[in-house]
Image (spheres, rainbow, N blue to C red):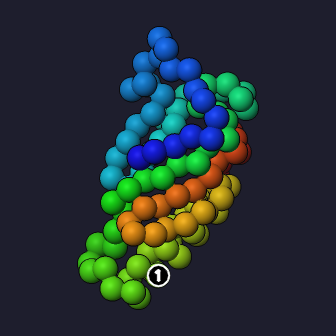
């Protein structure tokens, strides 16, 4: 998973309390409310999660269906879908407090 549009100072932060990673997922502030926009990780981010593949096969039709599901999933949460290419799922978050 890679991310970032703006630098974030993580010095002295317990990352286990702020970010959780799971298969095809990243959860930021899972057990607490996100801080104000521009503080901590609540800032404009472009996140790429790698190795996101359909469960059965990687033919063109399955990849297209996976891309459509990821796009729907992303937009329903109030984020911007950027692309799904070569198993890499990229989306943009502007404010975590606005996610659904």
| For residue 29, above or below residue 79 | above
Which of these two is toward me, 8 or 73? 8
Would residue 68 be found to the left or right of residue 63 on screen? Answer: right
Q: Judging from the image, what secondary structure is the residue with disc 1 in?
A: helix
Residue at point 71%, 29% (across, down): 38
* Residue 77 percent location from the top left of the image: 62, 56
Give how far across and how far down residue 13 sits, in percent. 47, 16
Picture residue at 64% right of the left edge, 48% below the top: 93
- Using the image, determine if residue 32 lies above or below residue 78: above
Left/right of residue 14 with respect to residue 37 in the rendered view: left
> Which sits in the foreground, 28 or 49?
49
Front residue of this view, candidates 16 and 38: 38
Residue reaching furthest to the bottom:
61
Whether 35 is drawn above or below 30: the answer is above
| Residue found at the far top of this picture | 12
Can residue 34 be seen? no
Q: Is residue 86 above or below residue 28?
A: below
> In the rendered image, is residue 32 in sight?
yes
Report which residue position mark 1 lands on: 64
* Residue 74: % across, % down: 58, 60
């Amino acid at each position: 998973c890679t991310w970032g549009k703006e630098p974030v100072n993580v010095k002295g932060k317990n990352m286990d309390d702020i970010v959780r990673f799971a298969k095809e997922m990243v959860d930021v502030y899972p057990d607490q409310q996100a801080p104000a926009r521009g503080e901590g990780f609540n800032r404009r981010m472009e996140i790429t999660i790698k190795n996101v593949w359909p469960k059965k096969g990687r033919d063109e039709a399955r990849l297209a269906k996976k891309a459509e599901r990821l796009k729907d999933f992303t937009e329903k949460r109030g984020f911007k879908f950027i692309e799904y290419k070569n198993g890499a799922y990229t989306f943009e978050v502007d404010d975590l407090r606005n996610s659904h």
